[in-house]
Image: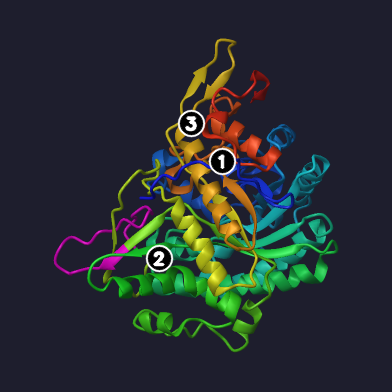
Amino acid sequence: MSTARQEPAQPLSFPAHFLLGSATAAYQIEGAATADGRGPSIWDTFSHTPGKTWNGDTGDIAADHYHRLEDDLDLMASLGLRAYRFSLSWPRVQPTGRGPANPKGLDFYSRLVDGLLARGIVPVATLYHWDLPQALEDEGGWTNRATAHAFADYARIVGEALGDRVAIWTTLNEPWCSAYLGYGSGAHAPGHTDGAAALAAVHHLNLAHGLAVQQLRAVTTNDPQYSITLNFHVLRGEGPGAEEAVRRIDALANRAFTEPLLRGHYPQDLIEDTADVTDWAFVQDGDLAQIHQPLDLLGVNYYATTTVRLWDGATARQNNDGHKDMGGSPWPGSPQVEFVAQDGPHTAMGWNIDPDGLEELLLDLHTRFPDQPLVITENGAAFDDHLSVRPDGSYAVHDPERVDYLHRHITAAHRALTAGVDLRGYFVWSLMDNFEWGYGYSKRFGIVHIDYETQRRTLKDSGAWFRQLAVTGAVPPLTSGRDAVPSAMTVR
């Protein structure tokens, strides 16, 4: 647990060019699952399979963003966002993952980008946030090398359509989750539990990134920046053999992506650790050169730290890695490592709150990759939020825990910036409450509250706090959010 730090006498300020924004993902907010030619994704299939999500929740409607685009754009503008990070639904653009584009799908994202630009908000587009077209999964999904090439074609289609206006392109969001939770543990779509399949998916996702960057570079016309977003695991070792436990999980969680992406090779210890799981024959000649593309930005997602130790083989093995246990393991080749429960405080996800871990991560990445600019593409917290009614009849959500969380983490990011880290921005997760994958609608991450029955949007105190940060560029005091939201900020 991180110790509290005294608030500075003067507000901490970020440079004028520092991007202060919010982030979302298509399947989590858009809804309109079958509208205007959208095809099914693996998350449509997974969420409609009994027992896979909390309460059987699906993304069929979600926050209905597809039908409420203009109102949501106005909401973003009212928050003073400097940038908005969104993802495109691959099956909305290509219903089966191949073939010509769906014009109505591309039109939606074109209107989104134009709406952002008209409001002075920088568009940051993510090509893939986990919603693989089901037709591609039927052919093997990310275990199939052909999916990487299909993704490159999709990137070209989107780049040709939006490549004159999008400022920052992100190829993949958290490929660790796509590979290990989707094909190893079974916690995410498509729900497989095969370690060898998970490692094949790791490589094909890395390959898809490299191919997509090259396609984007070939068709964009406005000199954008290119990136990928990784969910880094900040590891703490415990007990005898702590260093070995950390090394093994660091190889699977972090270096399986950073080394091929930024250095052009896979870690030898990762290959040796997983030799009993796979022979890595899916890595073909020339793949690593395709993967190793220069990046303008490296996206950093951070929520909590992870504590590991070597399992003694006798006591019950702890599995507190922060992810749903669906029977499989997201850690192929390392069954001797256990994940230890961490001290609180915790968020509603059960994740520990440790802003020092964010600072440590940024400093470590800067040390290992000193020439690589960074951007925090996700940071936020789920808490059990409750609507209240003000005397004037407007709605409010008082979420001091989230305000405190954001305050401490943005302050940690500022410390890293001051220490010399080339940090270009911070995106709070999430703009609005949404479908939280396997947890359905039971977890709320948004700085805007969504009433899922009425689709009413209500700015939380954390949203008011973040608005002050975005507008001024200075970290507001912790008291600036509560009751700071005028009734006009309740969007019906």
Res 334 visible = no
Is there CB contact under 8 Å for labels 2 and 1? no
Residue named by callout 2? 184
Magenta segment range? 308-328
- Which SS class for mark 1? loop
Instruction: Using a 10 Å C-alpha cutoff, classify the residue at mark 2 as few (fewer than 14 neighbours), some (14 to 19) or many (20 or more).
Output: many
Classified by dominant secondary structure, the portion drawn in magenta counts as loop
Q: Which amino acid, mark 1?
A: Asp
In primary-sequence order, the first of circles 2 and 1 is 1
Residue named by callout 3? 399
Tell me where residue 451 sits by quadrant.
Answer: top right
Residue 274: give x, y in percent of width and height.
38, 79
Residue named by callout 1? 60
- Residue 371 sits above or below residue 305 on the image: below
Magenta stretch encompasses residue 325: yes
Furthest-left residue in this view:
314
Q: How many marks are shown on the rendered structure?
A: 3
Q: Which amino acid, mark 3?
A: Asp
For the residues labelled 3 and 2, the Cα–Cα distance comes to 35 Å
In primary-sequence order, the first of circles 3 and 1 is 1
In primary-sequence order, the first of circles 3 and 2 is 2
In the rendered view of the protein, which quadrant contains the C terminus? top right
Magenta stretch encompasses residue 319: yes
Is there CB contact under 8 Å for labels 3 and 2? no
- Which SS class for mark 3? loop
